C-alpha cells in the first residue's frame, strides 16, 4: 500500500446555536445547556494514501464543505483525531483567506506565511504567482476592489505555487474565463501527474468520475458510499434521479417553432476553442423541433467549431436527455477514436449520425459539448440544441428499441 498521508479516526464536527446571545452567558454561569447542537459531520474514519485523488460528492448540506475545512485546518474537530503529513493548500470559499483592505501583493505574502513559507521562499514564488494569476496591474490595489474572477485567479495561483503535498479544491473553480479555466485544469493535471494528493469537491459528476481514484458520497454528514468512482457515481446519480421527480425541473422545449435555426455559440473568446454553430437534421430537414418515428429516421448533428493553433485539438460530445432530465445516451469523438481536424482558418466540422434513430416514444433534448483533448475540461456547453419528439407505430415499452432476434426450436 502507498504511504498514508491523511488519517481520520472518528472525526466529527458539531455546531451550537443559541436562540439569544444572552443564552451563551447563562450557559457558562449556570452550567445548564441552553443551546441546540447541529451535527454537520458524523463520526468519520478515513485513510488516504499519498498520491490519491479523492472526489467528494453530495447534495448541498451533506457535509462536504465541513470535511474540506477540517482537512484544511480552518475549523477544529469536535471529536476524534485527525493527522495530516505534509503541507495543505486549499481553495475553499472564494477569497475567504484574503484581508479585504490589504493589497493583492500583501495578501500573497500573508497567505504564503500562513502556509509556512519563509519570506525568501515567497520572494522566489511571487513573480510566478502574479504571472499565473494574470492580474499584475492590480497587485497594489486592495482586494476588496477585485471581481470574483480576480479573487479566484489569485487564490488558485497562490494555492498551487506554495508546493503543497495536499491540494483541496471546492467549487471555486467554476468561476473564471475560458483561458484561465483551461490553465487551471492543466495545473491540476500537473499536480495529479506529480503524485500529489488531491481532494476534489464538485457537482460535475462527469469530471469527478474522470479525475478521481476514489469517491466519497456524503449525505447528512455520513458516508453513504465510498469506493471506485464509476460505482459510487452511478449509485449517487440514481439517488438524485429518485428525488428528481420532486426537485428537478424537466428540460424546456428547445423552441416554439419548427423553423430551421442553427444554434450559435454565445462565446466570443478567441483564445480557447469555441462552438460556431450546431445544426440538427432529420432525414435532411433542418429544424429546432422535429417529429420523427422510432427506428425509421436518420438524425444528424453537425457541430462547427473553431480551435486555436496553440492548444491541442478539442473533442466533441453529444448528449441526449429525456423529458425528466435524465441522460439517456451520449457519443463522443474521444471515446469513438475520431480525430478532429481544422482548416487554414482553424475552423472544423464534425457530423454525428444516428441511423434509424432507436429511441422509443418520448420527448428528447440534445446538448453539445466542446471539450479538451482528454475529454475532461469543458470549453463550451450548448444547451437545448434541438427537441426530438419521437412517435412509434409498435407497442414496445421502455426507452430504446434494442436489436434482437427470436429463435424457435
Image (spheres, grey):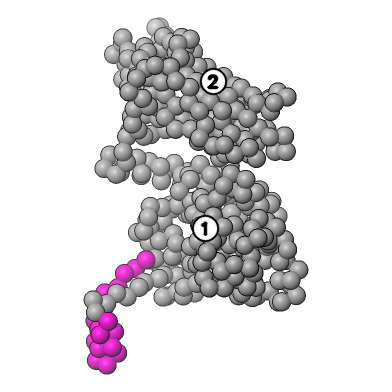
Magenta stretch contains residue 346: no
Left-right relation of 103 to 42: right
The tag earlier along the polypeptide, 2 or 1, is 1
Label 2 crowd bin: few (<14), some (14–19), many (20+), radius 10 Å: some
Residue 368, compared with residue 230, is above or below; it is: above
Where residue 260 appears, as percent x and y from the top left, is 43, 17
Taking the image as drawn, is residue 24 in sight?
A: yes
Where residue 24 appears, as percent x and y from the top left, is 29, 84
Please identify the quadrant where the N terminus is shown: bottom right
Residue 215, compared with residue 127, is above or below; it is: above
Q: Residue at x 44, y 32 (%)?
A: 383
Residue 106, compared with residue 90, is above or below; it is: below
Taking the image as drawn, is residue 92 in sight?
A: no
Left-right relation of 306 to 292: right
Q: Residue at x 64, y 65 (%)?
A: 139
Label 1 crowd bin: few (<14), some (14–19), many (20+), radius 10 Å: few
Q: Quarter-wise, where is residue 357 in the image?
A: top left
In this view, the residue in front, 68 or 252, is 252
Left-right relation of 225 to 181: left
Q: Give, as a single range, the part of the protein colored magenta.
A: 21-40
**Furthest residue in direction bottom, as rendered:** 29
| Residue pointed to by mark 2 | 302
Q: CA distance from mark 2 to mark 1?
A: 37 Å
| Residue pointed to by mark 1 | 147
Q: Residue at x 37, y 55 (%)?
A: 60
Amino acid at each position: 500500500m502507498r504511504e498514508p498521508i491523511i488519517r481520520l479516526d472518528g472525526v466529527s464536527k458539531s455546531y451550537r446555536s443559541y436562540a439569544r446571545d444572552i443564552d451563551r452567558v447563562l450557559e457558562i454561569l449556570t452550567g445548564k445547556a441552553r443551546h441546540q447542537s447541529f451535527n454537520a459531520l458524523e463520526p468519520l474514519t478515513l485513510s488516504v494514501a499519498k498520491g490519491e485523488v479523492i472526489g467528494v460528492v453530495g447534495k448541498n448540506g451533506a457535509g462536504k464543505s465541513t470535511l474540506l475545512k477540517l482537512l484544511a485546518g480552518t475549523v477544529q474537530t469536535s471529536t476524534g483525531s485527525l493527522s495530516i503529513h505534509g503541507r495543505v493548500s486549499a481553495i475553499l470559499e472564494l477569497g475567504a483567506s484574503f484581508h479585504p483592505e490589504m493589497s493583492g501583493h500583501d495578501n500573497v505574502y500573508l497567505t504564503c506565511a500562513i502556509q509556512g513559507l519563509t519570506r525568501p521562499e515567497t520572494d522566489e514564488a511571487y513573480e510566478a504567482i502574479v504571472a499565473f494569476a494574470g492580474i499584475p496591474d492590480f497587485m497594489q490595489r486592495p482586494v476588496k476592489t477585485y471581481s470574483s474572477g480576480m479573487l479566484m485567479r489569485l487564490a488558485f495561483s497562490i494555492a498551487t505555487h506554495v508546493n503543497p503535498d495536499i491540494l483541496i479544491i471546492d467549487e471555486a473553480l467554476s468561476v473564471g474565463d475560458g483561458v484561465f479555466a483551461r490553465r487551471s485544469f492543466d495545473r491540476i493535471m500537473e499536480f495529479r501527474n506529480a503524485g500529489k494528493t488531491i481532494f476534489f469537491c464538485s457537482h460535475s459528476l462527469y469530471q469527478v468520475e474522470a479525475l478521481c481514484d476514489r469517491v466519497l458520497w456524503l449525505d447528512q454528514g455520513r458516508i453513504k458510499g465510498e469506493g471506485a468512482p464509476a460505482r459510487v457515481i452511478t449509485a449517487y446519480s440514481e439517488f438524485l434521479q429518485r428525488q428528481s421527480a420532486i426537485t428537478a425541473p424537466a428540460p424546456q422545449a428547445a423552441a416554439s417553432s419548427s423553423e430551421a435555426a442553427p444554434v450559435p455559440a454565445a462565446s466570443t473568446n478567441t483564445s480557447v476553442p469555441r462552438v460556431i454553430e450546431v445544426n440538427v437534421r432529420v432525414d435532411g430537414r433542418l429544424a429546432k423541433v422535429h417529429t420523427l418515428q422510432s427506428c425509421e429516421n436518420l438524425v444528424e448533428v453537425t457541430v462547427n467549431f473553431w480551435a486555436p493553433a496553440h492548444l491541442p485539438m478539442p473533442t466533441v460530445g453529444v448528449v441526449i436527455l429525456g423529458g425528466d432530465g435524465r441522460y439517456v445516451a451520449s457519443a463522443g469523438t474521444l471515446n469513438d477514436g475520431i480525430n478532429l481536424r481544422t482548416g487554414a482558418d482553424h475552423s472544423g466540422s464534425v457530423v454525428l449520425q444516428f441511423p434509424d434513430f432507436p429511441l422509443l416514444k418520448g420527448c428528447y433534448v440534445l446538448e453539445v459539448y466542446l471539450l479538451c483533448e482528454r475529454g475532461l475540461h469543458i470549453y463550451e456547453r450548448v444547451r437545448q440544441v434541438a427537441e426530438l419528439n419521437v412517435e412509434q407505430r409498435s407497442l414496445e415499452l421502455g426507452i430504446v428499441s434494442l436489436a434482437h432476434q427470436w429463435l424457435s426450436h
